[in-house]
Image (spheres, rainbow, N blue to C red):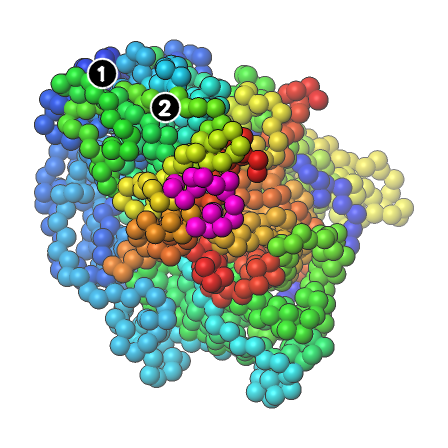
Amino acid sequence: MRYLAATTAREAAEALAAEAGVTRVLAGGTDVLVQMKAGLVEPDLVVDIKKIPGIATITPEAGGFRIGAAVANAVLGEHEGVRALWPGVVEGANLIGSTQVQGRCTMAGNLCNASPAGDAAPGLVAANAVARIAGPEGERDCPVADIPAGPGKTTLKKGEVITSILLPARPARASDAYLRFIPRTEMDIAVASAAVSLELDADGTVKAARVVLGAVAPTVVVAEDAGRTLVGTKLDEATLAKMAKACEAVCKPIDDKRGTVAFRTKTAGTLAKRAALIAYARAGGAK
Amino acid sequence: MKSIPVSTTINGDACEFLCAPDETLLDALRNRLGLTGAKEGCGTGDCGACSVTLNGRLVCSCLVLGVEAEGAEITTIEGMADGDELHPLQRHFIDHAALQCGVCTPGILVAAKALLEKNPEPSDEEVRYWLAGNLCRCTGYDKIIRAVQAAAAEMRGA
Amino acid sequence: MSLDEYRKREFKQVGQRVRRPDGVDKVTGRAMYGADATAPGMLVGRILRSPHAHARIRGIDTSAAEALKGVKAVLTGADLPAQEDDFIRDVQDNCMARDKALYDGHAVAAVAAVDAATARAALKLIKVDYEVLPHVTDVDVAIKPGAPVVQKGRSLENVPAGMSENVTSHCEFGHGDPAAGFARADHVVERHFRTAATHQGYIEPHAALASVTSDGKAELWCCTQGQFFVRTLCAAIMGMEASQLRVTASEIGGGFGGKTTVFIEPVALALSRKAGRPVKIVMTRDEVFRATGPTVHTSTDVKIGMTKDGRITAAEAHLRYSGGAFPCGTVDMGAQAAFAAYDLEHVRTYGWNVLTNRPKEAAYRAPGAPQSIYAVESVVDELCQHFGLDPIDVRLKNAARKGTKSSYGPTFPDIGLIATLEAAKKHPHYSAPLQPGQGRGISCGFWFNFGGNSCVSLNINTDGTVGVTEGNPDIGGSRASISLMAAEELGIEYDRVRTIVADTSSLGYNDVTDGSRVTFAVGLATIKAAREAVRVMCGRAAKIWGIDAEAVEWKDGAAVPAGPNAGKFPPMSLAEIAAVSFETGGPIAGHHEVNVDGAGVSFGVHIVDVEVDKETGQTTVLRYTVFQDAGKAVHPSYVEGQMQGGAVQGIGWALNEEYIYGADGRLQNPGFLDYRVPVASDLPMIDTVILEIPNPGHPYGVRGVGETGIVPPLAAISNAVSRSAGIRLSELPMSPPRVLKALGG
Ligand SMILES: Cc1cc2nc3c(=O)[nH]c(=O)nc-3n(C[C@H](O)[C@H](O)[C@H](O)COP(=O)(O)OP(=O)(O)OC[C@H]3O[C@@H](n4cnc5c(N)ncnc54)[C@H](O)[C@@H]3O)c2cc1C
Ligand code: FES
Ligand code: FES
């Protein structure tokens, strides 16, 4: 294995593109090193992106925030501005692993690791976040939702590296929330999860809603119907029950050591309900 | 695999070592530098026994490559006491019987110190969540929480 | 049994919360654990493990591995001797498979190489020709005729005909006529239970550093609960004499029973002998889960009859335990422990051990008892609910007490169950109000405790300090407890005594640190060794004073004339006698070697409050109190620590911990991410109440405390869940999917 600490995104992209063998981008390494230890991957080249100038910074942009790909989630969680604007995204990112893991792990790494149960992904997708990608042929922007392609797979092409993620601006009276179910209180991988992002009218009626579920399909699922159910309501019980059903309808989970199909499906709906209420309260809704 | 020279600072002292590119910082500390205070309980980030700080952040040294330590500042359990003067956390861990077998202790002490530097007056719940990545199988955590709180109180001058 | 050891006394040292002698080393990272040692020219050993649950090994081609540069030795089962003795052969075959791989993770070959990368590469070059065989991992499937047979020819004669060959042994305990008893009951409940296999989950993986020299001598450094037993096993496997193999126990990073046998130690020795260099093997966490000793997994039927005023009329249990791919006696202990808390006229337990394609069971805190007592305490609770009776009252009404003929045979001497139940009943926790949706459960627990072979050598230094040498690894503060007892007996201050743990060449045989035996049995040997030293010191004083040795007695740390007739001499302190010892006959020491009898059984009662989230099936533990009869608590902090640690392991077992096998017979969760031990944020404080009912078999009344604490949580939490959510689960763990399913979700 060779190790390269790239000093520009271009250098990283070119080195990755030029390597014929197995390559890995190294951000926080909290997936890469675990996979190496387990013998699941034996990279020929590891490209560390943390030394690229500016890649570990958070910058305000167009009313939103651009989060560098090497910003550790602990650092993200300490950023007042991002926390205020996208609390659901931050809480998803901050649920990953332990304090120790938080000191290293990144949202971009979570996205590119492409686990269906990744905790950062649902919030980012609900936020309509956009990834900036550097490749051997230059830069492009891509909605975060289009990056995961299935367990462990992304749509990134050889040599492509995410350099930052843009969390867009949002109107007043808008907020989001993320919840996951794990058997313990910490240190588990989500058995089911839900992110809900809401925009409210002045009177507290939901104007726009995005509901995104994790760990219930090969990639995160945007529960379009569930989102639509919430629009025009103030999240009364009947609406929430209907929304939960709509969530259950889009779940295509698997039975495994972490949970059953029935459990995941039911719990995704339950979490979506609870997350919707939190997002609603955060957005200034009356509940 | 060609070894790579790494210059770093450990517990305040400049330090140079050679390591293989795929070698973890934990292995480098333990096998190359003789700093065996950090333990490998899992090697996969799940137990926290290998906790150290890297540029002031608490991390699992099993999830950091040795080569990533280039130019960094690292602190380990070996650097916690000031000469023969124990850190208040170390003292309270002994006094409160917060260790049984003691294998989790170095990691928990390093983690608890990082907590108290950030939050000198944590609630029990904050201590518990901060230490959730440090498994202790012997104590049931009760005495660990009490020892951390007692040290925090002493450090606040309470 | 020697039940006349105990004498009531006022303690000066024992009972103090002193600082442990190994504390500073352990908080500064200096303490040396298994993986922390190195040796000159050391090689790295690694083990190749079967990916199959059950496979015949038709051949192993190691030639490519041997040819790899940097590889110094390759080992397979063929390199180890044939063994006559069943017990030794099973241990050896578990360390290195011979003809068949019997479970996922079973060792099939090993290498020693100059570094880890070379060793890893060498393992990949070893070609094992497997013939994959049908496997069975579930006890209820394995017991049926027609199930794949794990090992042929292992059934004992007492196994009833018509069962699968996987059934290796059968046991039966009890007295009276259960059928007659059930006929007198107002209500009989019979339920079926299952418990998953769990793992001790010690944080330190097994590690061994072996050095065999060409003159046939060997040194072995390893993390173990018993260096002497390691020597016995390794000497047998290596064909060595005990005197030639010195085993040193490192500091140990948890064991809980799981480090009472060997897994990698003989492999490291054999590799070292072959390579002619020291070899170190450290297990990965994955190897620890797949290839060390988890608990049995069990299937149980319990039937109990009760009158409407809460008297148990009869009780019966059928226990089917599987200790993995080798015969295992744990079911006997489960069967004996099941009804130990009850004073019963009619009781019977039956047990079967069943082979499955899982790793060989190792002890885990009170082995066998949590599973059977979980089933019994669940049924007792259901009967309490049926009749609307208070669960502590019912247990008090039926509690075993002094003079009870226990369900496993012996008649109990002084025991602490009633006092423990009464303490629980009057504790504020038991009467604290609960919020809607919360439930409170209780359960009793029991463990036999154990004494065993113990040697202590105690040296009086000329400066008046004392060195105690004992032979049991200190897992949780036992050096402090032993120093306390030595200080107490000698009448000196605790910090004048230093206790160390010796290697196998420095002391006679000591049984493994298990059975909650160390503070009890090694403590007893320490007290007797101190008495021996006192006898010598009195003799020296007598010599100085020119009086008879019998005319001198020991009081408050000094020799004094025994009464006015002996003469008038000022007391001579231990330090004064020690200072002149070279002139009065030479160095002074006491030692004691004994196979200790008279361990006192220990009972515990736990109270737990939980809340079940009915939408997700998640159970939160809100409040927890442990009551346990410890006998004399020598170091109360470490007694509490045992109670707390045991309770939390039980909480993990009740809620989340389990070995999950796939249809392919492979372990699905060999890591801490999915083998879910409790983390700090899962738990409340664990309150403790120590009861000190003296054990008549120990001079200070000490019982063991280490094991009982893991027993009650299983049923206590299940009983609390039942009262919180209105559902009674009969399978552990009560993981959220299971609870939600039971709730109809
Ligand atoms: C103990 C533990 C607990 C964990 N708990 C959770 C949890 O609760 N929830 C959860 O979702 N995850 C969890 N994880 C997994 C992991 O921490 C997360 O997925 C994390 O976000 C990964 O980020 P990273 O920066 O460490 O990624 P890395 O390990 O550096 O990389 C992950 C993958 O993404 C690729 N990659 C990284 N950055 C980029 C980039 N900028 N461009 C292109 N490709 C890139 C890498 O090549 C690799 O394939 C846990 C891991 C551990 C060790
Ligand atoms: S060894 Fe690093 S977290 Fe367990
Ligand atoms: S004291 Fe043994 S693991 Fe914590």
- Please, what is the three-letter code of the amino acid marked with disc 1? Ala
Quadrant containing the N terminus of chain C is bottom right
Identify which residue is drawn at 68% across, 53% down. Answer: C434
Nearer the N terminus, badge 2 or badge 1? 1
User: Relative to C188, is C430 on the left or the right?
Assistant: right
Is residue C335 visible in this depiction of the protein?
yes
**Residue situated furthest right in the rendering:** C564
Q: Answer with the quarter of the image where residue C330 lies.
A: bottom left
Residue depth check, mark 2 versus mark 1: number of the one nearer the observer: 2
The image quadrant that residue C415 belongs to is: bottom right
Instruction: Please name the residue that numbered disc 2 is placed on.
Output: A167
User: What's the residue at 56%, 77% (across, down)?
Assistant: C189
Residue A24, position as x, y percentages in the image: 21, 28
Magenta residue check for C532: no
- SS type, badge 1: helix
Image quadrant occupied by the C terminus of chain C? bottom left
- Amino acid beneath label 2: Leu
Q: Which residues are magenta?
A: A227-242
Left/right placement of residue A45 relative to residue A282 reads left
List x then y, in percent, for residue C240.
Answer: 31, 52
Q: Which residue is mark 1?
A: A9
Please say whether residue B48 is visible from this viewpoint.
Answer: no
Q: Position of residue C537 (x, y in %)?
A: 70, 42
